[in-house]
Image (cartoon, rainbow, N blue to C red):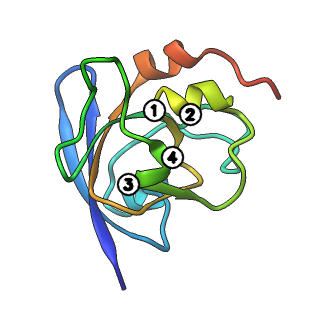
């Protein structure tokens, strides 16, 4: 079974690296090891579990032109992430309750990330 290292980075400076199987979501792996992440619906409609992709294993991070690593290079979704717009996904936001890793990566998590995105269109 293939797995990837996913490093969670809280805005207060804490970090935690998880070994996440491609068949698991980031949220499932975090719960397995006792790392607390917020969540609610577990179906990609409420935005509570949102994180922001910071970089991929190859060191790709924000480019000088402001481009971010592509979320599609790092994650596959179990279902369509209805709570995120295409623009938000393009800015690196990812719903951790339905996202399975496809590469080693770093994700910013915490209340500030949630506040940046705003409310779910389905709320």
Q: Which residue is mark 4?
A: 96
Residue pictured at 47% horizontal, 55% vertical? 75
* Image-quadrant location for residue 103: bottom left
The circle on residue 92 is 1
User: Residue lying farthest bottom?
Assistant: 1
- The image shows residue 54, relative to residue 4, as above or below, that is above
Q: Which residue is mark 3?
A: 30
Circle 2 — which element? helix
Query: For the residues marked 3 and 1, what is the alpha-carbon distance in whole angstroms?
Result: 20 Å
Residue pictured at 40% horizontal, 63% vertical? 102
Circle 4 — which element? loop
- Residue 20 place in picture, x, y as percent: 35, 65
Q: How many marks?
A: 4
The circle on residue 89 is 2
- The image shows residue 31, relative to residue 49, as above or below, that is below
Residue pictured at 47% horizontal, 60% vertical? 28
Q: Is residue 7 left or right of residue 42?
A: left
Q: Is residue 50 left or right of residue 9?
A: right
Query: For the residues marked 3 and 4, what is the alpha-carbon distance in whole angstroms?
Result: 10 Å
Which of label 3 and label 4 is nearer to you? 4
Other-residue count near label 1 (Cα within 10 Å), few / some / many at <14 / 14–19 / ≥20: many
- Residue 42 place in picture, x, y as percent: 66, 50
Query: For the residues marked 4 and 2, what is the alpha-carbon distance in whole angstroms?
Result: 12 Å
Q: Are marks 3 and 4 in contact (CB under 8 Å)?
A: yes
The residue lying toward the viewer, choosing from 5 and 88, is: 88
Quarter of the image containing the C terminus?
Answer: top right
Circle 3 — which element? helix
């Amino acid at each position: 079974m293939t797995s990837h290292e996913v490093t969670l980075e809280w805005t207060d400076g804490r970090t935690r690296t998880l070994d996440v199987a491609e068949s698991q979501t980031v949220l499932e792996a975090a719960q397995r090891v006792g790392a607390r992440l917020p969540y609610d619906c577990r179906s990609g409609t409420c935005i509570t579990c949102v994180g922001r992709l910071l970089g991929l294993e190859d060191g790709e991070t924000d480019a000088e032109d402001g481009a971010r690593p592509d979320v599609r290079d790092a994650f596959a979704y179990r279902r369509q992430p209805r709570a995120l717009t295409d623009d938000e996904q393009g800015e690196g936001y990812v719903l951790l309750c339905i996202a399975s890793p496809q590469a080693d990566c770093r994700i910013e998590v915490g209340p500030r990330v949630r506040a940046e995105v705003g409310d779910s269109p389905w709320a």
